[in-house]
Every structure is written in structure tokens, then in C-alpha cells.
Image (cartoon, rainbow, N blue to C red):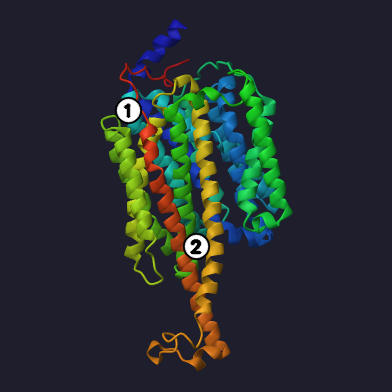
Amino acid sequence: MQASTATAAPDQAQPLNRRMITISIMLATIIQALDGTIANVALPHMQGSLSASTDQITWVLTSFIVAAAIATPLNGWLVDRFGLKKVFLVSVAGFTIASVLCGLAGSLAQIVGARVLQGVFGAALVPLSQSVLLDINPREKHGSAMAVWGMGVMIGPILGPTLGGWLTDSYNWRWVFFINVPIGAIAFYGIWRYIRPTAPTRRVSFDAFGFITLSLAIGALQMLLDRGEQNDWFASPETWIEAVLLALSLSYFIAHTALRPAGQSFLDYRLLKNPNYVTGLFLIFTVGMVLFATRALMPTMLQGLMGYPAALAGLVTAPSGLGTMLAMLVVGRVTGKIDFRILLGAGFAITAFSLWQMAQYTIVMSQADIVWPGVIQGVGLGLVFVPLSAATFATLSPQMRAEGTALYSLIRNIGSSIGIALVQTLLVRNSATMHAELAAKVNIANPALMDPAGGYSLASITNAAGAALVDSEITRQASMIAYTNDYWLMMILTAAVIPALLLIRPPKAQASPAPVDHAALD
């Protein structure tokens, strides 16, 4: 063992290993983050190729989300049982193989099954990459490490639709999945080559009942959110079944885990005794809602309402990602030198301002009117993401990071699911409400409508062609109002969480613990 340590010592002194570890794990993070959104634009092509209905093809998205959500809480136990490197390698290999199966699928059942495997194996990639970056860097460099991690996580929802559209148009939808193979292979080699195994601690026993009840709760929640709008929510028996299953399984999970001692419970409640960590969970839940809800609204608004082609819609939304990355690079250098709360407050305030700008959108606006609010929002979220990750884990012991990062990722994903479901539901309902209100004003008693200078006349709205034209315009205007109402809601939610920053406490000054040397341990 001494010989092995002596051999590893020169490697420990080489900074290249830390960089290679970072590159390897971030490649794994990127392919998982991309696959959450990259398949969205390819769905119409898949639908025709696989002979699926519109409702059926959405399972390509839903199966991945549900499987990943259910598997995410397992990460802490798996790392405790088998060690971080083994779990990471199996996850990358499994995700890459599942990507190949997705690309080779010849039926809907095959691709849904492969997407389930993708979700199961990919669930560990994002939280484990965060845990490794925190381990291999001393505390004073955690801000820079979280900036790198944040860029990997954020690149998915930003570049996924654009890259997916280009691959689908230039080749075919199968390359949306085949693109993961070379990236996954490089990530696997880097993790195998530069991360040395750490001995599993095996301090936590597997809580089967806790896992089953939590899985049922997460699965029911995801299904309720994904299919609620299609089923007209609680007008459908399916929604009621999902809601009852969610309530019962979650109640059993809370009661069961609360009564079990630490180390024997699927959820370590000691995590919830850390004020910074709990506040961080609340804030990342809000970030997930705002980020993914906005990303879900923008493409449909640009393409469906304003007639943008997919490529142009991707180009005008991509600069928001540039704003995020630039902000992360800057804030990564100042995190630790400036109070967390100041950076977070500035980030949330800038994000709220960008959403206020989006709430001023109209049917007639230039591309610059779309680009600049997106860039500003990107800057705001970039200012939030890095210090929030650093603040959340600043006072958490290294032994609890694997489980802590898994729960952190799970809460962010749940926030995004709830945010998307919320804005889509409000969009549909507000569009119908505003259409009815605007249509009620189309009558001969409205002097503005009957003004010949406006291009309308009684004859122009009473014949079939004219009435259809007016109704089409009313639909467009009603939809635009519904979109802006959603942006107003996101702005209010973002501004409302700013007072919660007062609950965050900076870590006490103390010696920085030595980083866990994954490049040298044997």
C-alpha cells in the first residue's frame, strides 16, 4: 500500500489530473442535461417514423423524466454501497448504451423502454459530478468549481432544442441520441483513467419501503403534471388516481422515514437540520420553475404565435445561454470574496427585471426585443446558480454530499416540472378567457371597430371570410396576453423569494478541509 501511495504522489502534484477529472465529469453532465430537452424538436419526426399518435409520442419525453426522477434518490445509497467511481462508470456506460438503443429503436415501445434506461442511468450523472467537483477542490475554490458545474447543467435547456433541430434537419432524429456515443465514450475513459476508487463506507442500509413509497410519490407527481393538462386536470379519473397515490405514498414515506434512525432511513433528516441547505432547496426549486418554465414558453410563442422558423427561434434564444455562461465565469471568481446573499440578491433582482421586460412583449416586436431580455435573464440566473450551489453546501459535511447533491437535483427537477405544468395550464386557460373577453367587444356598439379609418366595417366582419380573419386576430392577441400573464407570474415568484436570502448564513471562518484526492486514492 505504501508503494502504491508513493507511486500516486507525483500524480497528486500534477494539476492536469484535476482538470482532466473536471473535463470528464462535465462531459457526462452535458449529455445528461442535453437529453432532457434535445429530443423535443424531433418528436414530430419520431411520430411519423414510429407510427405513434400525438399523445403516445410524448411518452418519449415523459418516460425519461419519470425514470430519472425516481432513480435520483438512490444515488446516496449507491455511492455509500459501491463507491463513487463504480457508480459513475456504470451510469455513464449505461446511459451511452441506452442512447444507442434509442437511436436504433424501431417501435414506440422500444424507444420508450430505452428512454427509461436513459433516465435510470442518467439520474446519477449531474449530482455525482457536483459532488466530485466539491470533493476535489478546496472550499475557497468551490465558487469556481460550481461555475463550471453550472455551465454544464445549464447548457442542456439552452442548447438542447437548437442542437436537436439541427441534427434532425441535417441528418435524422436518430442522431439526437447517437451524438451521445462519442461524448459518453470520452467521459467514460476519463473517469476510468483519472478517478481512483474510494472504498465504500457502507454506513447506510437500503430502506426498501422508503424507496418504494418515494418512487411512487415521484412517479405519480410527474404523471399528474405531465398529463394533467391533456386530461383537463381533475375532470379526469386518471388525475384523481394520481393525486390520491401521490398523497398516500408521500404520507407513508414521511411517516416511515421520520421514525427510522439515521443510516437506516432512505432520507437522512439531518440534511433538513441545516438551515443553509434547506434554504438552498427552496431557492433552487424556484430557479427550476423560472428557468424551465421560461424555456418552455419561448419556443411556442416564437414559432406558434409569431411565425418564427425553428432555426431562427433557436438563434434568438441562444444568447441567453451566453449571458449565463459569462455571468458564471465572473461570479465563480468572486464567490467567497463577496457575501453570498449580495450575489444572490443581485441575481434574483436582475432575473425579475428580465421577466418584467418579457411581460411587455407584443405581437409586433423586433428580434432585439427578444434577444436582450433573454441575455439579461441569462446573466441573472448565472449570478444565482453558482453562489446558490456554494451557499447550499458550504456548511454541509463532506460525508453527506452524495445524498445532499441527489436531493438538490431532485428538488430542482420537481420545480421545473411544476413550473412547466403551471405556465402551460395558465396559458391555455388565460388564452380562452381573453379570447372570450376580446370577442365580446366585436360588435356594432364598439365605435373603434366600426371606424372606417381602422380598416374595418360592418360588412367586413359579418361575412364568413371577414369573421374568420377577425377571429384569427383575436386568437393571436388573446394568446399574447396569456403569454405576458405567465411572465408576470414568473416575475412575481422570482421577486417574492428574495427575502428568503436573509435565512442564509455565511460559513464560519475555519481551515479549509483537504480536498478528496480522486486522482491519487487507491
| Image point (30%, 20%), residue name | 509
Label 2 SS: helix
SS class of the residue under badge 1?
helix
**Amino acid type assigned to the residue bearing label 2 in the image:** Thr
Q: Which residue corresponds to mark 2?
A: 300
Residue under pointer 1: 141
Which quadrant holds residue 205? top right
User: Where residue 54 sits: x, y (%)?
Assistant: 65, 61
Q: Earlier in the sequence, mark 1 or mark 2?
A: 1
Residue type, mark 1 in image: Lys
Residue at 37% in and 13% down: 9
For the residues labelled 1 and 2, the Cα–Cα distance comes to 40 Å
Q: Is residue 196 left or right of residue 44?
A: left
- Expressed as whole percent of the image width and height from the top left, the position of residue 356 reads 36, 57
Could you tell me residue 520's position as x and y percent? Answer: 42, 17
Compared with 178, 22 (above or below) is: above
Q: Residue furthest bottom?
A: 459
Q: Is residue 148 left or right of residue 110?
A: left
Q: Are marks 1 and 2 in contact (CB under 8 Å)?
A: no
Q: Is residue 101 visible?
A: no
